[in-house]
Image: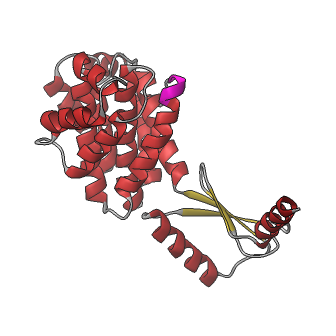
Amino acid sequence: MRAQLGGGSRQSLLAARTALDAAVKGVDAQTASTLSAELFFAADILGSNNSVRRALTDTSRDGAAKSTLIKDLLASKVGTAATGLLTELSALRWSGAKDLVQVIEQLAIEAEATAANISGELDRVENEMFVVSKTISNSSELRKAFKSDAQIAKAQLAADLLKNASSSTTKLVSQMVNSWRGRSIESAFADYQWALAARRNRVIALVRIAAPMSQAQQNRLEAALNKQVGQPVRMNIEVDPTVLGGVSVKFADEIVDGSVSNRLAGAARALAGSK
């Protein structure tokens, strides 16, 4: 999350996001959105139950016991994908029990962002979240209403405010206004916007090539990347003469390099190591 996590939790966040990638690979928008709702539900349950949080982040407790606890607590309320993902998260190391809740919330936001990406609406959702955040922040009446404990009133107010918004924006804002987790309105929106941007960066590919590609070549590469990632990928293409051939593709935190220059460099390293 945008919030600071301890060292162990930061490493676990990376593993958690990789697990989410696997959970949403190849699914449709509705499946991703359902996973999001179930993760939000789990975050709410754990956020209000300190003993369960501690049990799931206790390093002395074995994985089987944690898995059983998750199934007993949540299996009747969430699907197999969410149960499996939560079980994976419970096996990771957390610097603090509350960090687990923050990361589950981030995964929930990213899962809904995935649904929006599959539907071709991720840019729209990010823009709408920005507009809604400013609208609420700049109105003392809205701020007071959304920070109240009257969930029914907040739900109706959110519905009125979001009547022309996308489905994903409506779901995210409706979840947020009923679960501030002690944050200010500005901080909560910043967390959600940060997570949306993090998921968008996950599906942007920087493609480096030695010479411009034809539209047909771009289409084939895009199709191959979509298949590899399991959802729509956006390509930013950069012509770089140092790429001797092939193509180098960089995502947010990994490189899939098929360039000739990279293969030559690998060969040189191999030769140096054999002397």
User: What's drawn in magenta, residue-wise?
Assistant: 4-9
Residue 174 shown left or right of residue 209 in the figure: left
Q: In this view of the protein, which residue sits in the foreground, 75 or 59?
A: 59
Q: Going 78% across and 76% down the picture, which residue do you hit?
A: 245
Q: How many numbered circles are shown?
A: 0
Residue 174 can be seen in this image? no
Image x and y of residue 9, in percent = 47, 28
Question: With respect to residue 248, does 89 lie above or below?
Answer: above
The color scheme shown is secondary structure
Residue 128 can be seen in this image? yes
Q: In this view of the protein, which residue sits in the foreground, 62 or 52?
A: 62
Q: Going 72% across and 75% down the picture, which residue do you hit?
A: 246
Question: With respect to residue 222, does 69 lie above or below?
Answer: above
Image x and y of residue 90, in percent = 33, 34
Residue 78 shown left or right of residue 232 in the figure: left
Residue furthest left as drawn: 76
Residue 182 shown left or right of residue 255 in the figure: left
Image x and y of residue 41, in percent = 22, 35
Q: Quadrant of residue 36?
A: top left
Q: In this view of the protein, which residue sits in the foreground, 172 or 8?
A: 8
Q: Quadrant of residue 70?
A: top left
Q: Within the magenta stretch, is there residue 109?
A: no
Q: In this view of the protein, which residue sits in the foreground, 198 or 178?
A: 198
The quadrant the C terminus occupies is bottom right
Question: With respect to residue 198, does 52 lie above or below?
Answer: above
Q: Within the magenta stretch, is there residue 8?
A: yes
Q: Going 30% across and 20% down the picture, which residue do you hit?
A: 54
Image x and y of residue 185, in percent = 39, 22
